[in-house]
Image (spheres, helix red, strand yellow):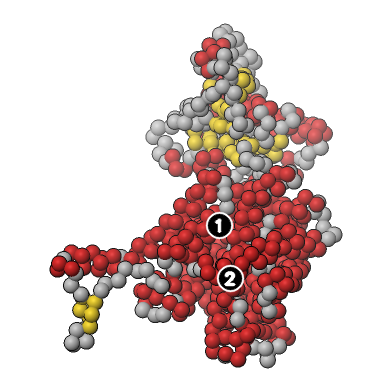
């Protein structure tokens, strides 16, 4: 029953609506009621995304699954107002028919989410893992489909038709839940890539499989063979339209017929058009179309689409937040109570039996070890596609039962399809959200709190700092194009690679597990600024640092805004050349234990007032890095990393010439052949030309 404020009225003799006078003739009361009713829709449209973004923030702050909070807030909102009632109030239609307007909007939002997910899938990142992904979305999906149907039949008591439909719906995982989970856990590159590809590709396939089963249920006279032909037609139509749409966008952008500020909006409109056209020609072909369209655009090399992806990422977060709030608010507690306690064993069977068995069978003969198989086998949270598809087909089955009373016995449990799916979403998200991170750490596939540092630059001062960070127990990785620097770093036992930090290879194919910070510390201020801006979307603004640029008043770099830079390392005045000068004159990197008896005062008295505190490891084992306007608050129990100036009149020989003259942007062939040859013999690495 709707709880929307209404205006009391009667029908006068002319058949017109007449407002009932308020007690005492208070017209202000009538105006207040009118105002509440007029602004109710706008209030609802504001409160839904507001709750969604708050849930996302709390999830990020306290490291808990965002989808779980979104569903719980949605259910709480549904106690006050369901979206069906809001639509019925605004349009004047019956609340039972409100989903006919709601679900097309949900489908369009899901299309945008899958399109954005497709834009993140690149073949070069997949590498030799394509075989495993293919078997997961084919072999594992079929095995899971059969096992879920059996579980639904014997645990929930569903008819075989409905159990088979539920099995098709629940084979999906989805980027809406897998993506945030991977971002929180940050497992190894191999596992992360496979789960990401599977989550995006399995969504349209699951939707098409659900169409297949639905057609057989709704039209039993058609038969399975004709339905299989329909399924194949859906895949071909969706893939064809997706490829045509991506080709059209590339053709437009290559001719510069579209200004940059319209790229994001134009991509959005074309993706929605492709989704609609595919659905018109083949039911549920739209999800296939937008997924194929996104993958095709991500892997072409004719135009750049990275700026479009950034726009879509922001839109995706908003859509996911809104969709889960809205769909969660449609759940009725009475329906959940009707399912009863049977939902608990059903979810447990799905998580601890169906998924592990299907993954194990699908990965037989692969090179994966048991740790990777176990982790992927236990991580399969369901997302927005399962929720939307279950809601849509559940309503369609109810409509069929209503129009054909003689067949109502087959569809009498159709109203439970969506609630069961939401129970599975809640259960899998809760179990994966709570258990995936400890499981990944136990299997040594992820760090509990990634706090290692990726250094852009491997000159002598940076190598010394990196060596001390490693002594603190954190992973350090150095990237530089100067092969001499890489050789020197490897001889110190540091993990170092000869590559361009601005290349896509570092971000897309490099294993960054255990890395939580980025420090741009090359001799080039321009490279530092560009690299910091590039890695903000990988490590967030909080985790990106750079050396301060040299003062260049009146030049083009003097006006670079702070939003395009990383956080200034140290005291905000630590430039590369100041750092190099410190080491040339004998400065040392030291680790100092702070106690009650030996605090910062004693440290400065020992090493000098010019001692620069760069980092600290807290008593709890967390790494903190000093930044301009954010000095470190050192406490007893901390271990601090400092750059201590040399004693007075003490000088060391100047640093190697390449430490001052080389840049991370310089070419690796600048290293003399004899040095490169010695490095190859020393550590077995490839030559600079091979690595470049």
Residue at image location 60% in from the left, 81% down from the top: 412
Given residues 670 and 317, the one toward you in this image is 317
User: Which image quadrant is residue 34 in?
Assistant: bottom left
User: Which image quadrant is residue 477 in?
Assistant: top right
Residue at image location 46% in from the left, 52% down from the top: 54
Given residues 198 and 5, the one toward you in this image is 5
| Disc 2 target residue | 338
Tell me how far mark 1 sits from mark 2, CA to CA: 24 Å
Observer able to see residue 645:
no
Please tell me which of labels 1 and 2 falls first in the chain: 1
- Few, some or many C-alpha atoms within 10 Å of disc 1 (few <14, some 14-19, many ≥20)? many
Given residues 128 and 153, the one toward you in this image is 153
Residue at image location 69% in from the left, 63% down from the top: 345
Q: Secondary structure at mark 2?
A: helix
- Residue 437 screen position, x and y as percent: 66, 47
Q: Is residue 427 above or below residue 549?
A: below
Depth check, mark 1 against mark 2: the one in front is 2
Q: Secondary structure at mark 1?
A: helix
| Disc 1 target residue | 67
Observer able to see residue 520:
yes
- Few, some or many C-alpha atoms within 10 Å of disc 2 (few <14, some 14-19, many ≥20)? few
């Amino acid at each position: 029953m709707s709880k929307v404020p209404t205006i009391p009225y009667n029908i006068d003799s002319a058949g017109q609506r007449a407002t009932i006078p308020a007690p005492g003739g208070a017209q202000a009361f009538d105006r207040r009621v009118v105002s509440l009713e007029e602004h109710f829709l706008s209030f609802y449209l504001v409160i839904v995304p507001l709750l969604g973004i708050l849930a996302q923030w709390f999830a990020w702050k306290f490291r808990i699954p965002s989808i779980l909070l979104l569903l719980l807030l949605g259910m709480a909102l549904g106690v006050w107002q369901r979206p069906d009632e809001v639509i019925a109030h605004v349009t004047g239609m019956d609340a039972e028919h409100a989903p006919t307007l709601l679900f097309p909007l949900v489908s369009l939002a899901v299309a945008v989410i899958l399109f954005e997910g497709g834009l993140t899938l690149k073949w070069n990142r997949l590498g030799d893992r394509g075989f495993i992904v293919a078997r997961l979305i084919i072999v594992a999906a079929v095995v899971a489909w059969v096992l879920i149907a059996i579980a639904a039949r014997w645990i929930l008591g569903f008819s075989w038709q409905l159990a088979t439909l539920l099995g098709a719906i629940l084979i999906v995982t989805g980027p809406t839940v897998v993506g945030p989970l991977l971002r929180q856990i940050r497992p190894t590159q191999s596992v992360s890539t496979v789960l990401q590809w599977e989550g995006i590709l399995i969504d349209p396939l699951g939707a098409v499989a659900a169409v297949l089963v639905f057609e057989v249920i709704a039209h039993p006279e058609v038969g399975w063979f004709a339905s299989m032909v329909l399924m194949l037609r859906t895949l071909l139509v969706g893939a064809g339209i997706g490829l045509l749409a991506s080709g059209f966008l590339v053709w437009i952008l290559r001719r510069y017929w579209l200004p940059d500020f319209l790229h994001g909006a134009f991509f959005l409109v074309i993706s929605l058009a492709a989704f609609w056209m595919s659905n018109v020609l083949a039911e549920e072909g739209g999800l296939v179309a937008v997924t194929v369209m996104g993958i095709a655009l991500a892997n072409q090399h004719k135009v750049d689409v990275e700026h479009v992806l950034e726009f879509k990422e922001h839109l995706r977060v908003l859509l996911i937040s809104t969709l889960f709030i809205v769909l969660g608010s449609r759940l009725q507690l009475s329906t959940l109570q009707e399912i009863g306690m049977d939902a608990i064993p059903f979810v447990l069977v799905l998580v601890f039996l169906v998924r592990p068995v299907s993954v194990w069978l699908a990965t037989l003969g692969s090179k994966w070890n048991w740790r990777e198989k176990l982790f992927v086998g236990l991580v399969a949270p369901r997302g927005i596609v399962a929720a939307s598809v279950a809601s849509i087909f559940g309503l369609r089955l109810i409509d069929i039962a209503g129009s054909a009373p003689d067949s109502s016995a087959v569809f009498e449990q159709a109203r439970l399809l969506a609630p069961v799916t939401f129970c599975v979403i809640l259960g899998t998200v809760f179990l994966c959200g709570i258990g995936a991170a400890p499981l990944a750490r136990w299997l040594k596939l992820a760090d509990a709190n990634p706090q290692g540092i990726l250094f852009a630059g491997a000159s002598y001062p940076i190598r010394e700092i990196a060596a001390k960070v490693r002594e603190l127990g954190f992973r350090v990785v150095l990237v530089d194009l100067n092969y001499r620097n890489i050789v020197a770093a490897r001889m110190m036992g540091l993990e170092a690679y000869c590559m361009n930090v601005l290349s896509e290879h570092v971000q897309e194919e490099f294993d960054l597990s255990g890395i939580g910070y980025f420090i741009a510390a090359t001799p080039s201020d321009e490279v530092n600024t560009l690299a910091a801006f590039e890695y903000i979307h990988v490590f967030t603004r909080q985790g990106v640092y750079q050396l301060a640029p040299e003062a260049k008043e009146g030049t083009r770099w003097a006006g670079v805004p702070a939003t395009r830079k990383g956080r200034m390392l140290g005291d905000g005045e630590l430039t590369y050349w100041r750092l190099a000068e410190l080491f040339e004159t004998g400065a040392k990197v030291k680790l100092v234990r702070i106690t009650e008896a030996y605090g910062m005062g004693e440290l400065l008295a020992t090493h000098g007032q010019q001692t620069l505190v760069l980092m600290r490891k807290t008593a709890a084992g967390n790494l903190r890095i000093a930044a301009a306007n954010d000095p470190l608050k050192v406490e007893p129990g901390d271990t601090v990393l400092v750059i201590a100036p040399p004693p007075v009149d003490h000088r060391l020989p100047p640093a190697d010439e390449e430490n001052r003259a080389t840049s991370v942007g310089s070419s690796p062939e600048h290293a003399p052949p004899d040095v490169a040859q010695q490095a190859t013999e020393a550590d077995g690495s490839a030559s600079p030309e091979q690595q470049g």
